[in-house]
Structures are given as C-alpha cells and as structure tokens.
Image: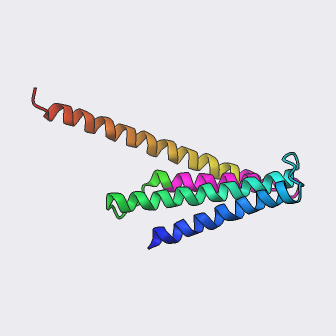
Amino acid sequence: MLTILIALIVLAALWNLLKLVATSLLLVDIFDPTDPAVFQTVFGAIFTVVIALEFKRSLLVVVERRFGIVQVRTVVMIAILAVVRKFVILDLSQTEAMKLLALGAAILALGIVYWLVRDQDRREAEVAALESAETRPP
C-alpha cells in the first residue's frame, strides 16, 4: 500500500514537471535555460522527481528482501539529493553566507558517511567471498 502511495506521488511530481516544461517551452515560449529563475525551477522539479524515485526504490528493496530495515546508504543518498536540490533552488543573492556554509558542511558530512558505509559494505562483501571460498570443497 505504501509503495502505491509513493508511486502516485512520483507520478504527480513527474506530471507537474512535464506540465511546467511543456507550458513554458511549447505554449508560452518563455523557456530560457540561461535565466537563473527558470533553471532553478526546472532543475528543482527534476530533483524532486529523482528524490521521489530513489525513495520509492528504497521501499521496494525493503519489500523484496523482506528486511525491516532500510539501508543506511540509501537514506544518506536521499539526504544528499535533498541538500543538492536546496543548493540548486537557492537564490545566492538573497542567501546568507552562514546558510551556504551550513549546507556545504551538511554535504561534506553526508559524503563522508556515504563513503564510510560504502567502504564497510565492500569489506563485508570481500570477507563473505573469502569465507565462501574457504568452505567450498576443492
């Protein structure tokens, strides 16, 4: 039931993105990718769709594997995408330097966590491969 709800949210976000691009590009002909406001609006909507798709994929992985936990790597990836989206939609002329510093620090911290989790997953996979090679009969 939850995956159906997330799928509907993804479809609604995708519909809004398509409607935004279609009305600005085809009907009104004001789509100027060099205009920062248009760039922020379109890519903010694209990131919203990507975040929703990644969230839906993480829920499907949980349902398929029958695990009650969501992998930390996926949650960190969604958080990184959300902060990157915030960077894209920010109006730099109106944003305080401390807010930019805080968002940069958040990206750095999330990147470090993602790297550590990925490295730990790689090590666990190597250990599992070695253990299975040792238990295999010659």
Give the magenta range.
75-102
* Residue 43 x/y as whole percent: 73, 52
Taking the image as shown, residue 59 lies to the left or right of residue 81, namely left
In this rendering, the count of numbered labels is 0
Taking the spot 16% from the left edge, 31% from the top edge, the residue there is: 134
* Residue 116 x/y as whole percent: 47, 43
Taking the image as shown, residue 3 lies to the left or right of residue 32, namely left
Pick whichever, 23 or 2, lies toward us. 23
* Residue 103 x/y as whole percent: 69, 53
**Is residue 109 in view?**
yes
Q: Residue furthest left?
A: 137
Taking the spot 48% from the left edge, 57% from the top edge, the residue there is: 57
Pick whichever, 51 or 70, lies toward us. 51
Q: Is residue 108 magenta?
A: no
Taking the spot 69% from the left edge, 49% from the top edge, the residue there is: 104
Taking the spot 39% from the left edge, 60% from the top edge, the residue there is: 62
What is the quadrant of residue 111 in the picture? top right
